[in-house]
């Protein structure tokens, strides 16, 4: 939802062109532009250190932001391009695109697991929940971004594998990966139990077989 969307702070940049961009960089800013959404483009600048911190967190290009610019209404944006220094690989320019509420966007949605207490395999069976994906990239409406995807663990058994097809997805949300039924999590037996089972199998295999021959004194 909107209150979960991170803010991205920017300032209106005075002037356009290479000269204004160089001035912004000398002042510790990254020049940029926001466009789309039925409004005129606006030249912006963002704090270099804050932007670099966000970039290093990863998935900047697939994160929806709430752009805050003094004197302008807040607007949802997504990054559509980052220019970088050819040697230092540091950001030198950023392109942001405004999104309407009816626009669709690819974004990573967190996975939330519920009702673990109602899962006998986890509660008393000693099973271990192994999470393969703690977030899933989904194609959703910009105006209806879910906080999370819910996986209900109630009734799950030991050895169960939970695929994306096993989850009730929010209305209008579609996995970006649509050509395979990928795994979200599985419930595994505890390692000690699995090891005991393996030992029992080995012991059974190692029992020597005795060939039965004729009684003493008798010919075969």
Image (spheres, rainbow, N blue to C red):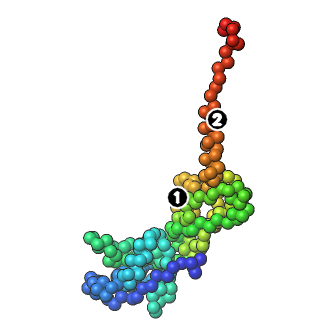
Q: Residue at x 39, y 77 (%)?
A: 52
- Residue at 31 percent across and 71 percent down: it is 89
Q: Quadrant of the N terminus?
A: bottom right
Q: Residues within 10 Å of mark 1 (few under 14, many from 20)?
A: few
Q: Which residue extends farthest bottom?
A: 71
**Residue 135 placement, left or right of 153:** left
Residue 207 seen: yes
| Nearer the camera: disc 1 or disc 2 | 2
Q: Nearer the viewer, residue 211 or 121?
A: 211
- Number of marks drawn: 2
Which residue matches tag 1? 177
Residue 44 at what x, y percent from top left?
A: 38, 85
Could one spot residue 162 in this view of the protein?
A: no
Q: Which residue appears at 70% of the width and 53% of the height?
A: 157
Most extreme residue toward the top is 219
Figure quadrant of residue 41:
bottom left
Q: Position of residue 204 (x, y in %)?
A: 64, 35
Q: Is residue 78 left or right of residue 115?
A: left
Along the horizontal axis of the image, is 214 left or right of 78? right
Q: Earlier in the sequence, mark 1 or mark 2?
A: 1
Residue that mark 2 sits on: 204
Q: Secondary structure at mark 2?
A: helix
Q: Nearer the viewer, residue 167 or 115?
A: 115
């Amino acid at each position: 939802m909107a209150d979960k969307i991170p803010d991205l702070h920017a300032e209106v940049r005075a002037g356009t062109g290479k000269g204004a961009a160089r001035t912004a960089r000398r002042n510790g800013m990254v020049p940029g532009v926001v466009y789309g959404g039925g409004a005129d483009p606006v030249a912006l600048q963002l704090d270099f250190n804050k932007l670099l911190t966000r970039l290093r967190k990863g998935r900047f290009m697939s994160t929806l932001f709430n752009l805050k610019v003094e004197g302008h209404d807040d607007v949802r944006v997504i990054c559509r391009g980052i220019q970088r220094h050819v040697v230092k690989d540091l950001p030198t320019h950023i392109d942001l695109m405004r999104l309407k509420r009816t626009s669709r966007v690819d974004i990573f949605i967190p996975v939330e697991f519920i009702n673990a207490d109602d899962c006998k395999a986890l509660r008393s069976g000693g099973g271990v929940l192994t999470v393969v994906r703690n977030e899933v990239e989904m194609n959703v409406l910009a105006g209806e971004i879910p906080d999370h995807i819910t996986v209900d663990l109630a009734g799950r058994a030991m050895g169960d594998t939970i695929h994306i097809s096993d989850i009730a997805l929010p209305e209008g949300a579609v996995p970006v990966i649509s050509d395979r039924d990928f795994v979200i999590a599985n419930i595994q037996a505890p390692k000690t139990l699995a090891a005991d089972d393996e030992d029992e199998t080995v012991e059974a295999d190692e029992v020597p077989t005795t060939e039965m021959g004729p009684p003493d004194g008798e010919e075969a």
